[in-house]
Amino acid sequence: MKVLMLTLQNDPPTLDTGADQKDQYKAYGKTFRKLITDCLQKDPTKRPTATELLKHPIFKKAKDKKYLQSTLIAIGPSLETRVQKASKRQPGTSGRLHRTITGEWTWSSEEECDGQSSDDECQEKPLNKLIEVPQSSDSEHESGDEHLNLVLRMRNSNRELNDIRFEFLLGNDTPDGISTELVGAGLVDCRDADVIAMNLRVLIGNQTRDRPVTFALVSGCNSDEIPDEKMLVGYAQLSYAD
């Protein structure tokens, strides 16, 4: 209530209201400042309408639809290409998470891998590709069992069930680091990072590798869905890859 009262009593904000420094927005001209002032007036009847805004000099400089068509649509994939790609995608499409030699993560669906000219080309894209320092043959043999091929099964934003496959390198990777990179790659909701890391520790610590770990997601499920552990609605599952 106090905030509402202060809002009504105080003057409306200006362009410089949220400035951290005195001359932070000094470069903005009078035309832009007047536009901001007009749009932030307390009295709604004094604010410019959408029609009036379109006639404003600033918005008149905006690019029209023809410019967008010639610039953006021309460089995008053709309609036939998009239709073919959409028709190939099936509900529940799975894929793999790859780490490039630069350390960045990229996502490849299995259909992209199937479209290669041979199976060897798919195998040339290992999961979670790492840059390794050359070692002697003895040390390579000793560290041969330190690579864990894991799968995170969960539903994506389209509610399709996806398998996110990645490699965990013991002694190098950490559960927190992997979950953070999954979030950074846009594959996992940031709210689920901690619970994924926690259950990743549980999975790696299990004596038997044939027992998956199923857990509830902090992000939950959509309002029109009912949480279902078996169907992985509001849940996710970590396991070792076959």
Image (spheres, helix red, strand yellow):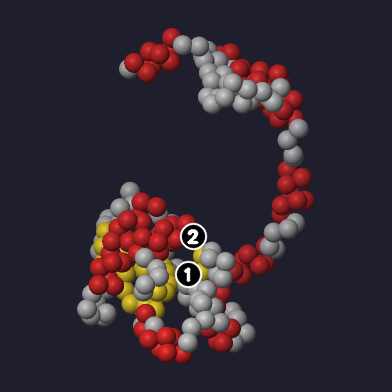
Q: Look at the image and tell me in which quarter the N terminus lies.
A: top left
Residue 113's image quarter? bottom right
N-terminal of the two: label 1 or label 2?
1
- Name the amino acid type tagged 2: Ala
- Give the image location of residue 120, x and y in percent: 56, 87
| Residue at 61% in and 26% down | 24
Please say if the residues under marks 1 and 2 sit with CB atoms less than 8 Å apart. yes
Nearer to us in this view, 88 or 171 = 171
Q: Is residue 172 left or right of residue 86?
A: left
Q: Element at badge 2? A: loop
* Residue 200 at x, y percent in the picture: 31, 67
On residue 185, which mark appears? 2
Pointer 2: residues within 10 angstroms few (<14), some, or many (20+)?
some
Name which residue lies at 37% across and 18% down.
3
Q: Is residue 157 above or below residue 62?
A: below
Relative vertical location of residue 21 with respect to residue 161 in this rendering, above or below: above
Furthest residue in direction left, as rendered: 207
State the image coordinates of residue 97 (x, y, percent, origin top left).
48, 69
Q: Is residue 137 left or right of residue 222?
A: right
Residue 224 lies, in percent from the top left, at 33, 51
What secondary structure is found at the residue carrying circle 1?
strand
- Please, what is the three-letter code of the amino acid marked with disc 1? Leu
Q: Which residue, given by chain and number where applicable, does mark 1 sit on? A: 97
Identified at 74% across, 39% down, the residue is: 63
Can residue 89 be seen here? The reply is: no
**Could you give the CA–CA distance between mark 1 and mark 2, rounded to whole angstroms?**
9 Å
- Horizontal side, residue 233 vs residue 137: left or right: left
